[in-house]
Amino acid sequence: MQSHSDPTPGGATLVLFETEHLKANIRSELAEAGLSPWQRKFLSDVLTRLEIYGSRARLSDKQLLKLNEILGANGTRRQEAVATSRTTRHSRRSRFRTPSFLSRQIRWWRRRLVRDVVVVALIVMVGLLYSVFETGPVQSFLGTVGTSSHVMGPVDQAFTVTDGDTVHVVGERAGTRLVGFNTPEKFSPQCEYERKLGERASSRLKELVKSPNLQLTKVPCACPAGSEGTDACNHGRSCGVLKVDGRDVGQILIGEGLAVPFVCEGNRCPRTPRPWCAQQS
């Protein structure tokens, strides 16, 4: 015989043939004279519910236990009622276990995706803000340049100041290292004094390039032949000389104590001078 179940959680639903057995047993018990008033009322209420709802009637575990206590002498009926309750609860858990697991997995992956997107967005925003505040407004200078970023000669494009001895021509992949001098590091300093001096050198270069008379000239880097423009040569950067009103900015910064000479010959350079932390001590 086909069974019917109530899809609404909250109570045990009795299959049809068990409902008919319970109704017959309750009627038999009500015909007995030994019932107490509350037992008779309880059995009458259950019978009424079974008569009205039939196979869709729901009885809680507590109601089933009371029913078993009243009908208790018959062990077979007790086993049938309890088995019905357990089967119904197991069926209900089986229906909801898999969707619940999948729902938890979907929610977990959704939260992780949102978190990763937010982290990436924050990193991009921080990078953009850093580039805006660090490089300052774009400056222009005189000259012409070919299609290659490593063509030697005067350059006619806008650029930004990276630090005291490096600029970045707009549109080029890597920056341009100004030759003949070295300024203190502000991104990877060896001490706090070097960092502060590096900030001053960078600020001073930004002041110098505000002049309308600028000229940036690309020159060969001191690298092995054929390595120009690769990571093996100056980390992929090109090399150049920047002049303000006809004066090399390197000489200006050296004269103001914000840089030291750093001269390469041929395809070799000496050890990069960084005396600032030693001077402090």
Image (cartoon, rainbow, N blue to C red):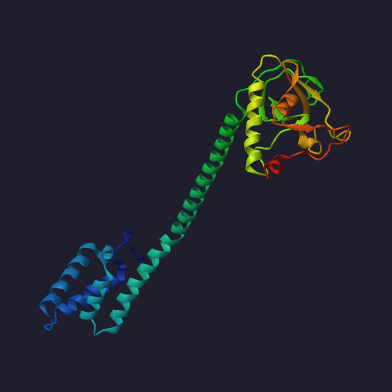
Q: Quadrant of the N terminus?
A: bottom left
Q: On the picture, is 164 further left or further right than 46? A: right
Residue visible at 77% across and 34% down in the picture: 236
Residue visible at 44% across and 62% down in the picture: 97
Q: On the picture, is 12 further left or further right than 255? A: left
Q: Nearer the viewer, residue 53 or 11?
A: 11
Residue visible at 84% across and 33% down in the picture: 264
Q: Nearer the viewer, residue 161 or 50?
A: 161
Q: Quadrant of the C terminus?
A: top right
Q: Count of labels shown? A: 0
Q: Quadrant of residue 23?
A: bottom left
Q: Position of residue 103 (x, y in %)?
A: 45, 54
Q: Position of residue 149 (x, y in %)?
A: 77, 25
Residue positioned most to the bottom: 73
Q: Position of residue 248 (x, y in %)?
A: 75, 22
Residue 253, above or below 189? above
Q: Quadrant of residue 7?
A: bottom left
Q: On the picture, is 30 further left or further right than 188? A: left
Q: On the picture, is 20 further left or further right than 147? A: left
Q: Position of residue 28 (x, y in %)?
A: 18, 79
Q: Nearer the viewer, residue 97 or 153?
A: 153
Q: Nearer the viewer, residue 249 or 74?
A: 249
Residue 219, above or below 88? above
